[in-house]
Amino acid sequence: MHVYGRKWQRAGFLCLAAVMLTGCGGKEKNQEPVAAAEGAMGSYEQVLTCTMGRRTLANPKFPEGDTYENNAYTRYVMEKLNVQIVDDFEANGEDYDRQVSLAIASGELPDAMFIGSKDILDELVENELVEDLTDVYNTYASSYIKEIYDSYGGRCLDTATYEGRLMAIPGTNLDSAPCVAYIRKDWLEKTGLMVDENKDHCLTIQELEEIAKTFLEQDPGGSGNPVGMAFAPYLTADDYGGSGYTINAITSAFGAFPKLWIEDKENKVVYGSVTEEMKATLGQLAKWFQEGILDPQFGTRTWDDITALLTNNQLGIAFGPWHIPDWLLNNVKGMNPEAEFAAFTVCDEENKVNVAHSNAGSGYMVVRKGYSNPEVIVKMLNLFFDDVVNNKNLEQEAPQVASYIQQGVDNSARPFQVEINSYTSLLDDYADIKNCLNGAITMEEVRTAESKSIVESIRRYQKESQPEVNDWAKYTSRMGGIELIESLTKNGQFQWETPVFRGTTKTMKKSSANLGKMEEEVFVGIVTGSIPLDGFDQFVADWNAQGGEKITGEIEEALAGTE
């Protein structure tokens, strides 16, 4: 049984949808089941059509002529499974969410589609609009796929399990903490600043302050207008991937877990943004702002503004997930070829790095109620995350698929649109990369095509006198960012917190937007000094009075199973 509490119904279109879809999704879409050869990836005897809802990107990097409906991945599905993918609708971002809502309201669900929201999945299940996938998963999922899900100890499949039945195939979301402070290594050398003397790449709050202050005073980038540290006005993030330009690395040092529901020392449910640890974090930021170490324009700088500070050599510290060299800091390197970044994080007074477990489920693939061959979604799962991943001869047997991986075509091109990776895959893949670079294993022994491609990138980076920026990015993110994660893991420096609730309650739907707005406004006010630090206590009182206390009670009821 999942721990997300009651599947709260939304009045409106889904009630209408439930009526319109009576009879298993509409007769015009039903068809006779198509027989398939036995096995996890057995092909269908006749062409099976599978209509889909597809989430897209503006620039997926397709080769000329390829589309979401007709590309190397969809052609591979046809070749291996005899399944024809037909897109009912395609859209990007919020437009995709609207298309999903329209499909539900009209009663015209595709045979399979991606769902990004747990709330929408809750409602689809509540209104009996999607297939129970328990039996097809148990029957058709390969042993390798089952091992991947098992590596999460049930935490992933549980997010899509209702009363013991698996109602969707969840994407996995492994732990890849901590929030990294990528710091200009060339500036550290230029200023002669000595920090991190034990070489564990963990900085104390005092060391981080010293670095920012030195960069501010000495202006090693020669910009004439340096900035010590800069943060986005929303300050915190409740998921690792969204931690760019946030203070999550700093909240870690104070043992605060903003935006997450956790248990306090008395085992009571508490919202991490209203704790004394969060108050202490804001006090530190207010001190930095007053001293000029924190960006004087904090609160008004946008994401793009902070990126501009980095590329203009005004800012030498960038906070975010380990992979920001691949898609963010590469822009800094492109503008400033001399720029080099070292990966650090921030520890507490006991040299521990406090981090929260990620939500183990991330996105879902669902099958509409009444589809003739619901097992096809599991066969595609096997195809992309077992067959492709473990095929040592992929370049010979599926050259177009191998080329997509090598060229970095976005993974949204796959008709199975969630990512499936074992809980240890990040460090497992990194071990392959490092061992191959060190000569401990051969390229043939590297397990995945993506890891092989990264090895090649890093080798080019190490060989060329003027390496390509993309090769530099792969080197920096892996040999810096993931190396940091591996080191912290081996040294036992992580101190893990497990959030107790990630769902949505009735009062959350009514009050979360206003509570979130109040939180951001008060936090920005405290940091900039327009609200005194003691104003945090009034914020907590207001937060409780305006819905926070009620939400906490609803969560306690959900966790106790008494909702």
Image (cartoon, grey):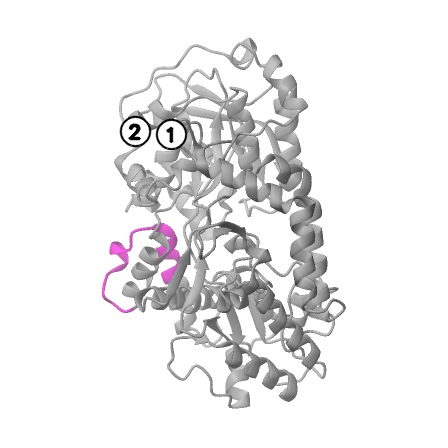
> Residue 75, can we see it?
yes
Of the numbered discs 1 and 2, the one sitting upstream in the chain is 2
Q: In this view, does 61 lie to the left or right of 199?
A: right
Q: In this view, does 492 lie above or below 190?
A: above
* Position in image of residue 171 (x %, y %): 44, 40
Residue range of the region highlighted in magenta in the rendering: 438-455
Provide residue 96's location: percent of width, then percent of height: 63, 35
Badge 1 element? helix
Is the residue 86 above or below the residue 512 in the image? above
Residue 445, by quadrant, is bottom left
Give residue 178's position: percent from left, percent from top: 46, 62
SS of the residue at dot 2? loop
Q: Counting other residues with Cα less than 10 Å from the Cα at mark 2, is it few (<14), some (14-19), or many (20 or more)?
A: many
Q: How many callouts does the rendering have?
A: 2
User: Residue 13's mark?
Assistant: none
Mark 1, other Cα within 10 Å: few <14 / some 14–19 / many ≥20: many
Q: Which of 321 and 276 is in front in this view?
A: 276
Residue 313 seen in render: no
In this view of the protein, which residue sits in the foreground, 38 or 103? 103
Q: Which residue lies furthest to the bottom in this view?
A: 192
Tell me the amino acid under the disc marked 1: Val
Q: Where is residue 194 in the image (x, y as percent from the top left)?
A: 47, 87
Q: How far apart are marks 1 and 2 (CA)?
A: 8 Å
Give the residue drawn at x 56%, y 34%: 119
Disc 2 marks which residue? 40
Circle 1 is placed at which residue position?
378
Could you tell me if the residues under marks 1 and 2 are in contact, i.e. CB atoms within 8 Å?
Answer: yes
Q: As shown in the figure, which amino acid type bears the numbered disc 2? A: Ala
